[in-house]
């Protein structure tokens, strides 16, 4: 009988530790992952390039997305103006852009509180349809890079654990596309150089965006 006491004591001492380990593990697994549908609309101001046409641009931006944790998949729609008055020539167009992007939350304050702050980066691609007001269209692909910040207020969870969210965003977004070929372009040196080249065929459009977002 006495030989069984050491074994019984070892089982009794190990049982709470095992139970604590399971509880801790199950507690970690119970932390929910954020799932959120998100919609956005805002104003875009910046400088748009289409070949040798460059100037101030204004328009609006909108998007729909779905977020899982720190990663979001987004569908984008933009509409903005392009124009210049170089050499006395008035050239203006309206650009419609559709695209998709992958967004990653670089830094945030978590998802449990009623206020959220989120700093994110985004990489995507799109398709531009440029329609010149005096006639002519240009269709081309582009690549998008963006950095932005969200400030969000969140409601209390409903009976399904979902929370309404609404807030403000601001971002800087760059669209990079290949400029249309210019058969009249001559190799030249804009400044001191060792070799003359044709003008660059890379268009870079940069926007500052601000607006509102909401979701659940």
Image (spheres, rainbow, N blue to C red):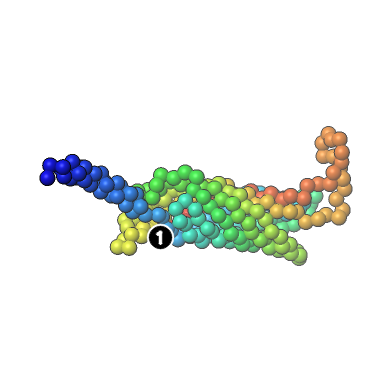
Q: Quadrant of the C terminus?
A: bottom left
Q: Residue at x 31, y 61 (%)?
A: 158
- Relative side of 73 to 134, left or right: left
Q: Quadrant of the N terminus?
A: top left
Residue 41 seen in the current view: no
Residue 51 seen in the current view: yes
Q: Position of residue 148 (x, y in %)?
A: 53, 47
Q: Which residue is mark 1?
A: 216
Q: Mark 1 falls on what kind of element?
A: loop
**In front: 157, or 128?**
157
Q: Residue at x 81, y 46 (%)?
A: 199
- Relative side of 81 to 197, left or right: left
- Relative side of 197 to 212, left or right: right
Q: Residue at x 87, y 48 (%)?
A: 186
**In front: 92, or 60?**
60
Q: Position of residue 108 (x, y in %)?
A: 44, 45
């Amino acid at each position: 009988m006495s030989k069984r006491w050491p074994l019984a004591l070892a089982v009794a001492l190990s049982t709470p530790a095992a139970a604590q380990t399971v509880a801790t593990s199950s507690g970690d697994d119970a932390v929910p992952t954020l799932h959120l549908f998100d919609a956005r609309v805002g104003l875009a101001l910046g400088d748009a390039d289409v070949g040798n046409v460059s100037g101030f641009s204004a328009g609006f931006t909108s998007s729909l997305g779905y977020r899982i944790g720190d990663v979001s998949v987004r569908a984008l729609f933009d509409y903005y103006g392009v124009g210049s008055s170089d050499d006395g020539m008035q050239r203006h167009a309206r650009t419609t852009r559709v695209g998709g992007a992958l967004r990653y939350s670089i830094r945030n304050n978590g998802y449990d509180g009623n206020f959220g702050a989120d700093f994110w980066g985004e990489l995507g691609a799109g398709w531009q349809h440029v329609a010149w007001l005096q006639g002519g269209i240009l269709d081309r692909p582009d690549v998008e890079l963006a950095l932005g910040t969200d400030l969000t207020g969140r409601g209390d969870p409903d009976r399904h654990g979902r929370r309404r969210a609404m807030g403000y965003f601001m971002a800087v977004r760059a669209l990079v596309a290949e400029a249309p070929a210019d058969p009249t372009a001559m190799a030249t040196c804009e400044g001191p150089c060792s070799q003359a080249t044709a003008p660059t065929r890379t268009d870079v459009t940069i926007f500052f965006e601000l607006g509102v977002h909401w979701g659940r």
